Amino acid sequence: MIDAEVAPGGDQSSLRHLNTSRVLHLLYDGAPLTVNTLARVTGLSRPTVRGIVTTLVEAGLLAPDGEDTVRTGGRPARRYAFDRSAGRLAGIRFDVDGVWVRVTDLAGESAVTAHVALPSDAAAARRIETAVSLVRDQLPSPDTPLWAAGAGTPGIVDSDGVVRLSVAIPGWTGTELTRDLGAGLGCRVVAAKDTNLAALAEHRSGAAQGVPDVLYVRMAGRLGVGILVDGLPFTGRTGAAGEIGRHPELGWREAPAKLFAASGSPRDTEDEAGALVFARALQGDPEARAAVDAYARTLADGIGAMALAVDTRLVVLGGGLAKWGVAVLDPIRRRLAEICYEVPPLALSALTDDAVSVGGVEAARDLVRAGMPGTVDAILGS
């Protein structure tokens, strides 16, 4: 008998749970596999794996997915895949002017998105209710189970999903995001600082794929930083890690307003004003170039301080102005060369405004992985 199938103390029920979780984990993150391949990878016997697969198919979590292309002379073996349509995941982005949601299958794909604008003084309860309704409206049917959700918001968010401080959204400080969204959506929820979720998204599917240590810098009406260490968001003791804009000598609070003022168009939105200045700078306008250089220098001072502290492998510039970020790359590099021992590589976001909700879905996927034992418990009726 294979060691993996021998339960310590004779606890066969615990072993059954463990083996079922192993198979489910393997197929959740991987390609479709046959029973024979699953047995070889896990070290379990074919009868054990076949029994587990049958149980998971009956529970609606696995589904047949064609036949093995490798011919052995007999009947082709059937492959099994995690049924990504068995439920849905949600990524939610809160900001001062509204709520954005992204609802996907359990693989984080087949996304549908939606947005509702809100007044800046909207109450916290209204924001939560709007997010819950918006997510539910994107589900294929009222009966479709929502497995998990990840929510991002500006401000400081602690490990319990409580907004400890929000400057951008009035009346948002103290909101228990994880608790309130979980109650409204009826699923597991994780809440985090928006820029940390954006960093996670860039790492998983954007400009920082394969890079474990990343600084994500948000360029928009508000500057902000997200930190990824060893592929995971770094929050620090209270959730305030990366809040470099708090430092009064860096000038991060004032930098966006100074850039937008250089557009000379006070009626434009922040993104429109910023885009106008960047576009003029790229065309060689001297006043616009001076404004962009000053903005880039201020940005680089904060980036340099963070880079010296964490020695990151990559800096990703994101946010609503990232599409124009090429105008700031060279001045940022020049300033970083004066600050850092070695200038870290710079990249422009591949996701821009979608980064936070994409990161929310990825955080929800991590919740699903961590909750596999509970899923198996429900299946096996314990």
Image (tube, rainbow, N blue to C red):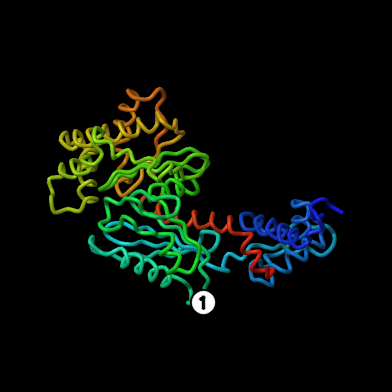
Q: Is residue 328 above or below residue 62?
A: above
Placement of the N terminus among the 4 image quadrants: bottom right
Q: Answer with the quarter of the image where residue 348 lies.
A: top left
Q: Is residue 125 above or below residue 162?
A: below
Amino acid type of the residue that numbered disc 1 sits on in the rendered structure: Asp
Mark 1 burial class by Cα count in 10 Å: few <14, some 14-19, many 20+ = few
Q: Is residue 357 above or below residue 184?
A: above
Left or right: 258, with 334 as reference point: left
Q: Mark 1 points at which residue?
A: 143
Question: How far across and down, in percent of the image, does residue 112 sit?
Answer: 43, 65
Residue at coordinates 34% horizontally, 29% vertically from top-left?
333
Regarding residue 348, the answer to whether it shows in the image is no
Regarding residue 28, the answer to whether it shows in the image is yes
Left or right: 261, with 84 as reference point: left
Does dot 1 land on a helix, a strand or a loop? loop
Question: How far across and down, in percent of the image, does residue 291 sit?
Answer: 19, 36
Residue at coordinates 34% horizontally, 68% vertically from top-left?
130
Question: How far across and down, in percent of the image, does residue 164 sit?
Answer: 35, 51
Q: Answer with the quarter of the image where residue 293 lies.
A: top left
Q: How many labels does the image show?
A: 1
Q: In this view, does 23 lie above or below 378?
A: above
Instruction: Work out which residue is located at the far bottom of the displayed protein and give it.
Output: 142
Residue at coordinates 76% horizontally, 55% vertically from top-left?
37
Question: How far across and down, in percent of the image, does residue 377 sit?
Answer: 65, 65
Placement of the C terminus among the 4 image quadrants: bottom right
